[in-house]
Image (cartoon, helix red, strand yellow):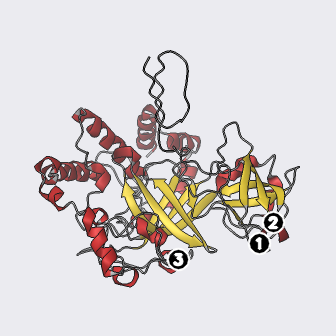
Amino acid sequence: MRTESHKAMTDMAASRRPLVAVCVALRSSECTSVFLQNRFFSTTTGFHSPLGDEQPGKFTPPTKPVIVDKTQAEVTQRKFLSPEFIPPRQRTVAVKFSIERKDMIQRRKMLNIPEFYPGCILAVTTSDPNANGKLNRFVGICIERSGKGLGATFTLRNVIEGQGVEICFELYNPRLQRIEVLKLEKRLDDNLTYLRDALPEYSTFDVNMKAVPSPATGEVPVNLLKVIMKPKPWSKRWERPKFKIQGIRFDLCLTEEQKQEAMKWDQSWQEFDLMKEYDTSKIEEEIWQEVKQEMGK
Amino acid sequence: MKMLVKASGLLLTQPFTNIVKHSFRISAACTAIQKLTRVRVVDNSALGSTPYHRPPKCIHVYTKNGVGKVGDKILLAIKGQKKKALIVGQKMPGHTMTPRFDSNNVVLIEDNGNPTGTRIKTPIPSNLRRLEGEYSKVLAIAQTFI
């Protein structure tokens, strides 16, 4: 018994495990028996690793701890590639985009950036550089997502104490600690900047609202809400066809004459302009495969 | 000796000068708060709360250029009086991660930096905390930081 345990000790001493130092200290047979009793080993003699070895004395490392990330509780099973991964049509070397994508994926492994669209209600927690260690939480509706690559941004809007506030957050800014989607839904438009000129009730969201659970599969629900506007003048002429807005109740705020006037700026030929075509389907597929692979690692 | 003076209406007697003047006015560059901007007073001071037939207007900006951003001191004309104020929110977008408000908000201030009112209900941008030294009392009366 002595020799076997001694052999085990020396083997392990050779491999320099910190645990061994403790065992070496308690080398008396008394101590090992006490140790064995406390640990309820099924094996008879000597010090054995808790999982059992293939050969006596060979060290097997413990299993890696399984980290359950509660922020990624419900991973979406929808195929969703975040729009900032798709490179713009530019005269740049393709390496620039692939390097940026690497950095973006690295950041996404640290922070879970969920799937969201303009029209979703998000809660973003950021660290405040001016107040050390304190976190700021902002809840609002995402009115637009712009920018490509690491400079991608999304703007959240909310009305707090009667004051409309908008914050443009950078998706890959290290100050962002947590992004939660409180309500996942789409709207009739991609750009909801017209909410600035809409009645404040359409931009007011409870700061303490609870997350609305949404299904991980299937189509994202579309909110067909049409918004009632404040009286003109607006910050932009939203009735003009270049904005292509579907989500405003124009019948309540514009006369037929004004609608006719707006149609004067209709440039419907641009839809057929071949030079403006940018088909991203193939690029999207490639990038989606790449991102899925990298994120899985 | 051809002189091209379009809209100036002056007759110059200098030899060959090519003066081209625009026939339209060029406005100032888009700035946050400058002279004659109408502002909204957000504290509960008497001067800011009582109605008057004219809105409070900025008449001077205490910066090197005449542009006032969040955290700058300005001079307001309120109810026929001159009063200093601190800008706490602007309509013009600033840096990313800083809030943009739907109105130009301002807090009335004394000459020594003490606020005139006792409470600020409207949210204040948290990057104003860098003004801990000078405007700490203004930050103390603010209720929400965004």
Nearer to me, A278 or B133: A278
Question: What secondary structure is marked by label 1?
Answer: loop
Q: Chain of mark 3?
A: A
Q: Residues within 10 Å of mark 2 (few under 14, many from 20)?
A: some
Q: What residue did someone put label 3 on?
A: A200
- Circle nearer the N terminus (1, 2): 1
Q: What residue did someone put label 1 on?
A: B52
Residue B123: quarter of image: bottom right
Q: Are marks 3 and 1 on the same chain?
A: no
Nearer to me, A43 or A117: A117
Quick check: can you spot residue A216? no
Question: What secondary structure is marked by label 2?
Answer: loop
Q: Are marks 1 and 2 on the same chain?
A: yes
Quick check: can you spot residue A234? yes
How far separated are the C-alphas under marks 1 and 2? 6 Å
Q: Chain of mark 1?
A: B
What amino acid type should be assigned to the residue bearing mark 2? Lys
**Of the residues tagged 3 and 1, which is closer to the observer?**
1
Q: What residue did someone put label 2 on?
A: B79
The residue at 38%/51% (across/down) is: A108
How far separated are the C-alphas under marks 3 and 1? 25 Å
What amino acid type should be assigned to the residue bearing mark 3? Pro
Horizontally, is A40 left or right of A216 in the view?
Answer: right
Question: What secondary structure is marked by label 3?
Answer: helix
Horizontally, is A204 left or right of B141 in the view?
Answer: left
x then y, percent, for residue A290: 21, 48
